[in-house]
Amino acid sequence: MKSTEWLNDARFTSWRLDISDLGWPDPTLAEKWRRRAETFQKEGANAVVLCGFQFRWDYLVILDRVLGILHEITEICHEHQLKVVEYHSPTLLHTIRSEEDRRTIHNGRQEQVPFYPDDWRKLSFQEKRLANWRQVSARNGKPVFYEPFTCECFCPNHPEFQKAYRAFIRHHLAEIPVDAILSADLHFLPDIYSCACTYCQKRFLSEYGFELPPTEDPEFWENRENPAFLAWIAARYRWNAEHYQRLRKWLPPEVLLWGRASCCLSAELPQTGFSPQLCAEHFDAIFYEIDPRHHPTNHSEEIASEITAFSSIARHFRKPLIALCHVHSSEDLPGWLDFLKPYDARPWISRQTLHEDAVPEESLLETGFDYPETPPGKPTFEPVQAIFFSETFRDSLEIEQGKDYVAQCRELCADLVARGIRPFLLFDTMWDSAAPALWECLWMLDPRALDKEKERKIAEWQQQGLAIGLS
Ligand SMILES: [Zn+2]
């Protein structure tokens, strides 16, 4: 079997770890895990995502214990024909500045086993100090702090971090026989002024020939009319995507890889420097995490446009699409599965993580997890209409104008989807291999997004009979 073929029939659910699991090797835990695996297997799941030890460096001082836990769970899952996805963040670490931070972590991040060092800045890995790898803000030259997650963040360009993460991953693979890795949270935080560490500054200078200026320089910073600033935005996307390029090379072919993203259209993306479409070539599957606040019956424009975008990326790269749904109750489950089917998205069913008393996955799936297999090689859908969405154009606009451009795209997507049409979103990087023969119409959101080469192609396609729509 080709290593990715199991994805064609994958039905994922979350395997939640909690603080009691740190009691391993207590034999009653193995009994609990075995019962859970039996339940998932009986209910129809055939893959689990290990959730709970997300900020993996938080657990460095008990890493062997964590890997021992994950090893035993993985073995139990395999005995029950459940594939196992290892899920972690390579870059984020909880950081405690005060007692208030402890309360914030306790109250706000129920998705993780609440364990973190009191002060990880003293920690080393392979005799290298973790603190040296932190992202630095151009505003003050100091390590950044990301308030929403109460964390600090490593820089993917730091050579010591890259070397350490490679060893870290090798150690994981040696200890846990996982089937896939979900490597999440490749972001520059908290804003466009990060990361200005020595290595990022050197790279920008060598790649673009331009020295990052002081933040007092209004000609550069936040000036979307300056090509050098736009090059800075583009470089950050590329640097985060390179994380996946490196990781894919390090992993054996049978261990699959994907990253985590909840949007690929938002005008906020240049802030964090993450663009799923630029990482996609390094992934074995395209993963769309539907925001837990959203549901197919509300936020229809956002969901309709994002699933259109992610399924278009999956179609373009000929890779399976996985969609994470946060489900309230077992009665809610069929509606979610029906929503995903037209996109051939493989379902990942999770509890509703926004609720403290959420219905657990075992109960969500108790009425069964029936979902059709995707025929091998089948593209996610056959588009008859396409919409040109340009990320580089979006990023060249002032933020409010960029938001309007995105809103225009979301509205058009939702309108077409409501009329039973599933459009294809044509991103900048897809023009070379675009297949306009399939389309009756290509929608233009804003003609300013076309450069000379794209104008030439449009004229050629029009001569071949393609209609151009203006929204
Ligand atoms: Zn850096």
Image (tube, rainbow, N blue to C red):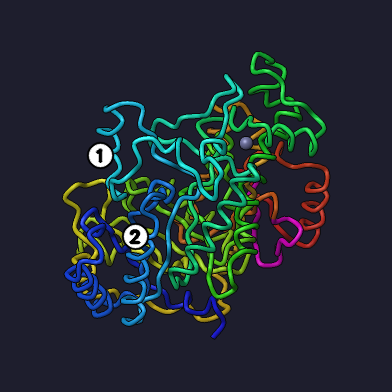
Query: Any mark on residue 65, and which?
Result: 2
Query: Any mark on residue 255, and which?
Result: none
How many marks the image carries: the answer is: 2
Q: In the image, 209: left or right of 471?
A: right
| Membership of 336 in magenta stretch | no
Q: Which residue is drawn at 58% across and 62% down?
A: 283
Amino acid residing under circle 1: His
Chain-order first, disc 1 or disc 2:
2
Callout 1: few (<14), some (14-19), or many (20+) C-alpha neighbours within 10 Å? Answer: some
Please provide percent x and percent y for residue 81: 35, 81
Q: In the image, 230: left or right of 29?
A: right
| Membership of 438 in magenta stretch | yes
Location of ligand 1 given as a quarter of the image? top right
Q: In which quarter of the image is residue 33?
A: bottom left
Amino acid residing under circle 2: Arg
Please provide percent x and percent y for residue 430: 69, 56
Labels 1 & 2 near each other (Cβ < 8 A): no
Q: Which residue is drawn at 58% across and 67% down?
A: 251
Query: Any mark on residue 106, and which?
Result: 1
Magenta span: 430-444
Please provide percent x and percent y for residue 93: 43, 41
Closer to us: 466 or 451: 451
